[in-house]
Image: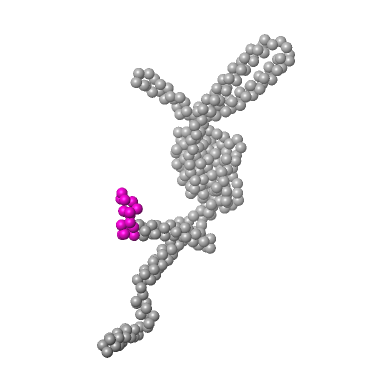
Amino acid sequence: MLNYKSAFFSRKNITYVNGHNGHSESTYNKVMMPGWKKRLLYISKSLAVIFILLFLFRLLYIYLVPHIIKNSNFHKDIFASVENLPKNYASERNEFKEDADKQFVVTPVQKYEKFATIKSSTPEFTSGETRIKKLTKQLNGVIQYEKKSGTETERELYLLVAVNPGQFDEFYREVQKIGVVEVKEVTKVDKTSEYLKLTLNKAVLEKALSSLNNLKSNTGRISAQVSLQNKMLEIETKLQALQVLLRSFAAENEFSSIRFSLYEGAKETSINLKTINNSLMWTIKNYTVVLLAIAFFIILGNLEKFNLLKLIMPGK
């Protein structure tokens, strides 16, 4: 009888709780929801909020910081396809150093080719073109190659500018103020061995030409003279080609190069289907990184909690 009453009052209490203040059975279930379900719901909401915030941040960034839509030829290396593109060389000057025996040692001359590659985009193409040419004139540069193409809103300008090696750094720094720099790099290639090889070949050809001249004066046969003349003409042609190459290494012709590409592009300021799609792709990519970072810290925290790090890395 006692057990029956206990059951009755227990049932009554449950009924009272369920009916108190009009709570339904479903409300009761929510109140009494297991802890893991609550945590899962909280985590799901938090992750959804993070995704939405990332997406809104990207849209706001595009709106507040306008981007320039890249030209279709932006990734092409136009200068690599130009035949007989001028090359400029410079020298590291001789240095006289005194060694331990009070003897002066002369360091060898280093010949090198140095050029900067800069690609910039701008919606103000005409202004950018004017500024680069004004800068070239201001720093006594020489435009060795120029190509301009494209129609309105998609114009392109390619310039190869030769500058004095001493003004290379200043020119490189100032040209980056034109438009938005997308690519910039400086390349320096040692050309000392190539220069020495050209000098040696020149000396060999000059010696051969001198020997043929002496031999020509001692040859009486016409056929032999004709053969010698043809051989001398061939050597002279090679000498002329070598002299042209060596002239590029001459001190008075020493320059460094600036390969400047300017692309016209419109500012991307409006929020449209394209920007929404790009923002969504950006959000998905970075959201994945965020999830991986969160997962890493959760796993690391659990490892520390259960002292599993000591098992994995005994030395820690």
Classify residue 101 by image quadrant: top left
Q: Is residue 175 magenta?
A: no
Is 183 on the left or on the right of 22, as rendered?
A: right
Q: Name the residue: 58% across, 20% down.
A: 204
Classify residue 31 by image quadrant: bottom left
Q: Name the residue: 31% across, 53% down.
A: 310
**Residue sitting nearer the eye, 112 or 39:** 39
Q: Name the residue: 58% across, 27% down.
A: 244
For the image, the number of numbered tags is: 0
Give the magenta part as a residue range. 301-316
Query: In the picture shown, does residue 17 fall above or below 203?
Result: below
Q: Where's residue 213, x and y in %?
A: 64, 14
Q: Where's residue 135, x and y in %?
A: 49, 40
**Residue sitting nearer the eye, 35 or 316:** 316
* Furthest residue toward bottom: 1
Q: Quadrant of the N terminus?
A: bottom left
Classify residue 38 by image quadrant: bottom left
Is 45 on the left or on the right of 73, as rendered?
A: left
Q: Is residue 303 magenta?
A: yes
Residue 6 in view in this figure: yes
Q: Where's residue 51, x and y in %?
A: 43, 63
Q: Where's residue 201, x and y in %?
A: 57, 23
By secondary structure, the bulk of the magenta-drawn segment is best described as helix
Is 224 on the left or on the right of 265, as rendered?
A: right
**Residue sitting nearer the eye, 15 or 277:** 15
The colour scheme used here is one colour
**Residue sitting nearer the eye, 38 or 66:** 38
